[in-house]
Each structure stands twice: as structure tokens, then as C-alpha cells.
Image (cartoon, helix red, strand yellow):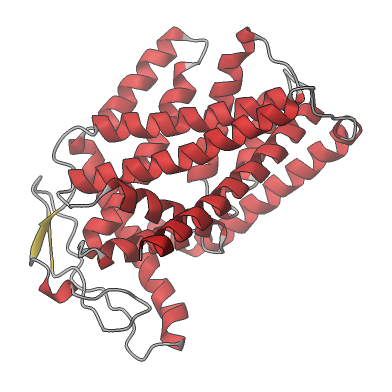
Amino acid sequence: MMRTILAAIKPYLRWVIIGLTLCFILAALRDGWSEVVQLRLRSQGLRYLMIGFGLTLLAHGWSGWVWGWILRDLDQTVTAPWAIGTFLRTNIAKYLPGNIWHFVGRVRAAIRQDIPLMIAVLSVAIEALCMAAAAAVLAIAVLPFPGAIGVGLILIAIGVHPRCFNPIVTRFAAGKVSQFERIQHQYIDQTSSKPLELQNRSIVQDSPNRSIVNPVQTSDDDFTGLTNLNNAPTAQPIGLQRYPWRSLLGELGFVILRGLGFLAVWLALAPLEIDDLPRLVGGFSFAWLLGLVVPGAPGGIGVFEATALSIWTTHWPTGIILGAIALYRLISVATEAIGAVLALGIKSGCK
């Protein structure tokens, strides 16, 4: 019953969140507009913006490298250049309606490398969940309450243990496959007489040695890119077999790079005391985490901004906060677009 109710309200929940965050941001912009129009770059502001741009672009490439680690942990043979290039080429698609196209692009690219469908979906699920766990670690680590820090970090450490993590990843991956199927029916059926059909997604089992059987039946349609999978093994291991230290630390590095990029953008507009660094880094990590997990506009737009404003307005002027998050959003989108162009250029040059 509860699941039916949640399924019924879920399509509207996104729009409610978008509306609330938009109203909150517009109200903050109205109240702080006089401060915003007075903002100017500091004497070294352009240099800080370039540093922020470089760190953010590096973060995206680093995350692609970590995705490659995850695929190798799932016993798939991929190279770091392929993983980074694929990640950069697809990352900009997260701003398209549906907020799933970057996942779809990575899954399609992985399948073209003869990686089974469910393993490909699992890899993007593990990457996203490790990213969320890393952001939570960084947000908790700077709390001013030592007891809360210890409890929070212990809970996260338990949560990413394979015994707890695999059921979560499996459920998340199954949801992504269902969403992927809906997209196929909505968009591909209009251009293909042989749409993708996902069959026998038997991924929820109580045994720690979970497996999937015949995860996909493919067609020769070039759009899906799901060729050669009929020759795939009939069963593939699913889930992590060991504690994901490397993936978690890798994603922690990604969040740190993103935080340093935001710090550089902030310094382009205003100075910052050393004592304020934990507040800025922790607040950024928490706002970025909510932008990742809360359903709203694609790419976390709105949720990140509203959360950052609510956390920082009691400590810093609203105008500086608005200027910093607006500049950082522009830099983030620009780095994703340029990263995609660079990856496409490198791919074309290698042909």
C-alpha cells in the first residue's frame, strides 16, 4: 500500500521540490540583490577562478578514473583512458530532463565493451552511492561535535560494508534498469522497430553470491549499442566481494577536489579566515550531497543552491553566497561541457 502511494506521488514530488527551491532562491536573491550588484572580483580573482576551473575539471576526470576502478573490481577489463573518456563524454547529459541520461550513456558505452548490462548498471550505481557516502564523510568530519563525528563515521563505515552495501546497490541498480526500460519505451520505440527488451533481471537474492541470468536480450539496432551480448556468459557475479576502500577513498578525493574548486571561486570574491574553512567545506559537501540524492531539477540545480544558502546565511553575507554559488555553477557546467568536447576530440583523434 505504502509503495503504491509513493509511486503515485513520486512524479509530483520532483516538481514540488523544484518549486520550493526556486521560491527560496528567488526570495534570497530579492533580499540580497543590493549586495549582489556590488560584487566585484578581487585583485587576484581571475586567477582564483582559473584555479577553480582547473580543479573542477580535474575532479570530473578523477571520478571517471574511479569508475574504471569499480568496473575492474567487478572483474571487467577496462582501461583508465576509456573510463575517463566515457565518463567525461556522458557527464554533461545529467542536465537533460529525466536526470538519467548520463547513466544511460555510460551503460551503453560499457555494453559496447562486452560488459554485461547488469554489471554496467551496477558500476554506475556503486559509483553514485560511493560518491554520496564520501560526501557524507566529509560533511560529518567537520562537525563541531566530536561524538557525532564518531557515530556518523561508524554508521557510514558499516553502511558501505558489502553485507549492507550490496542489497542497497542491487535495489538501486534494479530501479535504474526499470527507469532505463521506461526511457526505451518512451523514446526508442518511435525510431526503432526492435526496441531494447530487458529480461530475467533476477538480481534480488538472499545469497551473498548473487548472480544474474541472461540479463539482456539484444537487437542489432545501432542506437541501443547492445550488440554481442547474446554471447555473454549466462551468469555474472553481482555486487562487491570486498570492502570498497579504494572506491570510497577515490570518491572522497573527488568531493575534496570539488570542494577546493568551490573554495577557489569563493576566494575570487571574498577573503576567508582559516577558522571558516571547516564551515565552508562541510557546508559545501552537505549541499552537494543533497543535490545528488534529492529529486529535483537535473544535475542537482536548485537543491544545492538552496541548501548552501540555508546553511551559510547566518555566517556570511547573502550577496557573497549567491555570487559564489552562481559562479561555481557556471564553472561546473562549463567544465563538464569542455570535458565532453575534449573527450570526443581525443576519441576522434584516436580513430
Q: Position of residue 331 (x, y in %)?
A: 64, 42
Q: Would residue 168 be seen by someone viewing this image from the given angle? A: no
- Indicate left or right for 70 with 99 as reference: left
**Where, by quadrant of the figure, is residue 332 drawn?**
top right
Residue at figure coordinates x 30%, y 46% from the top left = 80
Residue at figure coordinates x 56%, y 15% from the top left = 278
Q: Position of residue 350 (x, y in %)?
A: 36, 61
Q: Quadrant of the N terminus?
A: bottom left
- Indicate left or right for 149 with 44 as reference: left
Residue at figure coordinates x 21%, y 61% from the top left = 115
Q: Quadrant of the C terminus?
A: bottom left
Q: Position of residue 73 (x, y in %)?
A: 19, 43
Figure label count: 0
Q: Would residue 203 be seen by someone viewing this image from the given angle? A: yes
Residue 195, above or below 69 = below
Residue at figure coordinates x 67%, y 27% from the top left = 48
Q: Position of residue 344 (x, y in %)?
A: 46, 60
**Where, by quadrant of the figure, is residue 35 drawn?**
top right
Residue 166, above or below 99 = above
Q: Considering depth in this image, is 209 or 38 the residue closer to the camera?
A: 38
Q: Considering depth in this image, is 224 or 195 the residue closer to the camera?
A: 224
**Where, by quadrant of the figure, is residue 282 drawn?**
top right
